Amino acid sequence: MSTSFAIPAARSAMLLRRRIATYFVGGADEIPALVTALGGHLVHELSVDIKDGVRESSMVCAVLLAAEETEPLLDRLRALPSVVSAELA
């Protein structure tokens, strides 16, 4: 007697927690655009560091992403005029 197992139909991709560090200019006015660029991804933590007299500010967040979503998200952040760099932290 043979036994067969059903393979589940297209399950959603495995989500991984990615820490992303984004450095930007323009201060607090740029935060809404940065958060919008995260576009619907589940954000677990988010911290923004803005200091007087320092040109660049930073935003670090932990986001749940499928592996194939990581680079498009980084590219979306990098495309913002205020962003100096966005990388995995």
Image: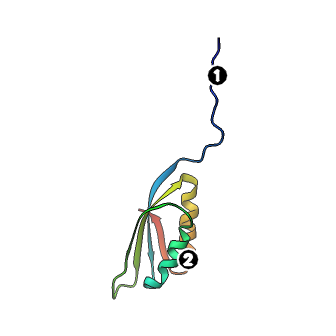
Q: Please count the marks in the image.
A: 2
| Relative image position of residue 88 (x, y in whole percent) | 45, 61
| Relative image position of residue 32 (x, y in whole percent) | 51, 78
Q: Residue at x 47, y 78 (%)?
A: 31
Q: Residue at x 42, y 72 (%)?
A: 59
How crowded is the residue under tag 2: few (<14 C-alpha within 10 Å), some, or many (20+)?
some
- N-terminal of the pair, mark 1 or mark 2, is 1
Q: Which residue position holds label 2? A: 80
| Three-letter code, disc 1 | Ser
Q: Which residue position holds label 1? A: 4
| Relative image position of residue 4 (x, y in whole percent) | 64, 22
For residue 8, above or below residue 40: above
Q: How is the image coloured?
A: rainbow
Quadrant where the N terminus is found in the figure: top right
Q: Residue at x 48, y 76 (%)?
A: 84
Camera-side residue of 13 and 81: 13
Query: Looking at the rendering, which quadrant does residue 48 occupy?
Result: bottom left
